[in-house]
Amino acid sequence: MKKRLLILTDTYSTQVNGVQTSLNALIRNLSDTLDITLVSADDFYTVPYPSYSELRLSVVSSQQIIKIIRDVNPDFIHIATEGTIGFTSANACRELGYAYTSAFHTKFPEYINIRMPLIRKKWVHKALLYIHSNASKIIVSNSIMERYLLENGYPKEKIRILHFWVDHTLFTPGPRTLFLELPRPILLFVGRISVEKNIRDFLSMQHAGTKLVVWDGPIRHTLEKEFPSVHFLGSQKKEDLVDIYRSADLFVFPSLTDTFGLVNIEALACGTPVLAYDTDGPNAIIQNGENGVLIPCGESLETGIDRGLLISHEACIKSASSYDWELFSEWFLEEQIPVTSL
């Protein structure tokens, strides 16, 4: 009889982000080993997040989560996010005396401070510690994020590093088949079109060539009007996204707050070098001058374009080869704690 894993997340199935991608990969790779139940925002009534209507907050109580836990009767519990589902799940586990693991995917203190500057980052960390300090283990994506947590008071003995990975059966190198009629170089951004992604730094670059933006977000229509020369391609199927990555000359990642940036590895796996700021997350993936270019914060990303175009596709592919979802899933399972281990 397979053991049961309960995963609780504030994301919902239609979202396209690193958290949802990693959860989909976990379920896909561990379903033969475990009986997995995913509880997400799909399962609850939701309301818009203040100042960000495209994000939804689930209306959920500890008693609802306790009932779910008792119905599933899991051997392991993993809380993947720190929204209302994450908080109530941590509280429910505390009431039941159950152990759980958590994950720190997103720099919420920075995100919230960008949108609501009056809310200090240390206040948000204090709230997040309710989830993570009570977890048996806190999973992060790299050693740089481990340092970030330590600097903000998270318990060192609980932190475990599990690098995010990429599906190498899908994201593979290949010929350029798209945008052949557009001026080169083709500069590509893939991600949510929102304030916290710092996308204006990309759109404002004056370098010759063509800028492409994939996916959607709350400020897309505003930016389309402000930057009419940029090609906004909207949401794409994963299979089509692969061709877009392959056909670009340089992938640009302007975020200053992302903890990892799974799209960076997807681009590298397709043979496309990455241009990013030298911040926590991208600098765990990009080796400056080898598979991409890192620009110091405060300087213009544009200064790295010409150097990025000199990076070999083979070096990019090689640097992404060690990131594999099956290994991530195996290591994730090894880090799980039986619910009765408190």
Image (cartoon, grey):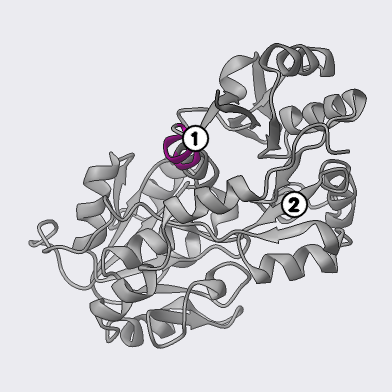
x, y percent for residue 178:
13, 56
Q: Is residue 155 magenta?
A: no
Residue 203 visible from this viewpoint: no
Q: Residue at x 49, y 66 (%)?
A: 201
Residue 138 is marked as 2
Mark with earlier residue (1, 2): 1
Rendered image quadrant of residue 198: bottom right
Location of the N terminus (image quadrant): top right
Q: Residue at x 53, y 70 (%)?
A: 282
x, y percent for residue 184:
18, 72
Q: Nearer the viewer, residue 62 or 297?
A: 62
Q: Residues within 10 Å of mark 1 (few under 14, many from 20)?
A: some
| Amino acid type at mark 1 | Thr
Location of the C terminus (image quadrant): top right
**Distance Cα–Cα, label 1 vs label 2:** 22 Å
In the rendered image, the residue lying farthest to the front is 1
x, y percent for residue 6:
64, 28
| Amino acid type at mark 2 | Ile
Q: Residue at x 82, y 44 (%)?
A: 135
Q: Which residue is mark 1?
A: 33
Apparent side of residue 69 relative to residue 272 in the rendered image (left or right): right
Q: Nearer the viewer, residue 322 or 186?
A: 322
Secondary structure beneath disc 2?
Answer: strand
Rendered image quadrant of residue 60: top right
Rendered image quadrant of residue 181: bottom left
Point out the stretch of residues depicted in magenta.
25-31
Q: Is residue 26 magenta?
A: yes
x, y percent for residue 107:
69, 55
